[in-house]
Image: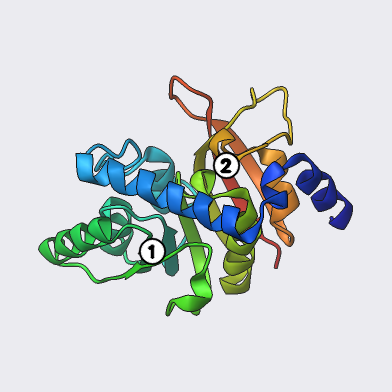
Amino acid sequence: MEETMDQLNAQNPDSDLTPTEQAQEEESVHRALEGFYRAGKPPWDTGVTPPELVALVEGQGALPPGRALELGCGTGTNAIYLARHGWEVAAVDLIDRAVDQARQRAEAAGVTVRLLHGDATRLDELNVPGPFDLFFDLSCYCGIPLHRRDAYAAGLTHRAAPGARLLMFGYGPEPLDNPTTEVKSWAAGVTADELRARFAGWELLDVTPGTNSVPTFWFTLQRVA
């Protein structure tokens, strides 16, 4: 695993950024996200719970309700859905405007969700100790600067119950039959090989293409018990 990570970092210019450049990149991402919410058009925040999450919660072989953490919860659609189906839910988003809307929506729906304004790569700064049985990420990880992605993975791993699932949606550069580890900037998205490299102690169970006009994927990972 260490050799794999070294190879991955060698391909990622972000790993060579100075602290000032890293901070500037994080601020740039923050501003871009805020801009989407100010315009009222974040493409990942559609107000509709994706069928992939519905299948995991309600379908054949559904997970029993437990504790869930959503990373990048937006205005709360999926956190509210999970709470309605018996899950104890905590949810985090970087944009305060989105979290405020999520709180209003959860209150209107009559469900309890612990909504937190914060950085999904800095969970130690938030009150989310875990353990969690389910992590859900709808386009959060794929927008995280490369130099913060190991921290994201470590934060989830530290809070994962044995056998915990991670359901992640993201865009990426690879066709499904031609995988590549060459994610050279956060704007390139995420690949299956990158997740295998970064998420030590997890098994990648499934990769399913999305239905978007650009390459997107649903990744299912499970914490090794």
Left or right of 174 in this view: 87: left
Return the x and y of residue 56 as percentages of the image width and height: 45, 49
Left or right of 199 in this view: 8: right
Counting residues from the N terminus, which is met first, the one under dot 1 or under dot 2?
Answer: 1
Residue type marked 2: Trp
Q: Is residue 163 visible?
A: no
Say what secondary structure mark 1 lies in: strand
CB under 8 Å between callouts 1 and 2? no
Residue 143's place in the image compared with 81, above or below, is: above
Residue at 64 percent of width and 22 percent of height: 175
Residue 50's place in the image compared with 141, above or below, is: above
- Figure quadrant of the C terminus: bottom right
Residue at 32 percent of width and 66 percent of height: 86
Whole-number angstrom distance, CA of label 1 to CA of label 2:
20 Å
**Number of marks in picture:** 2
Residue 61's place in the image compared with 118, above or below, is: above
Residue type marked 1: Val
| Disc 2 target residue | 186
Residue 92 shows which numbered tag? 1
Return the x and y of residue 210 as percentages of the image width and height: 48, 29
Left or right of 172 in this view: 113: left
Q: Residues within 10 Å of mark 2 (few under 14, many from 20)?
A: many
Left or right of 81 in this view: 135: right
- Figure quadrant of the N terminus: bottom right
Residue 36 shows which numbered tag? none
Residue at 72 percent of width and 48 percent of height: 196
Q: Is residue 90 visible?
A: yes
**Quarter of image, res 94:** bottom left
**Quarter of image, res 161:** bottom right
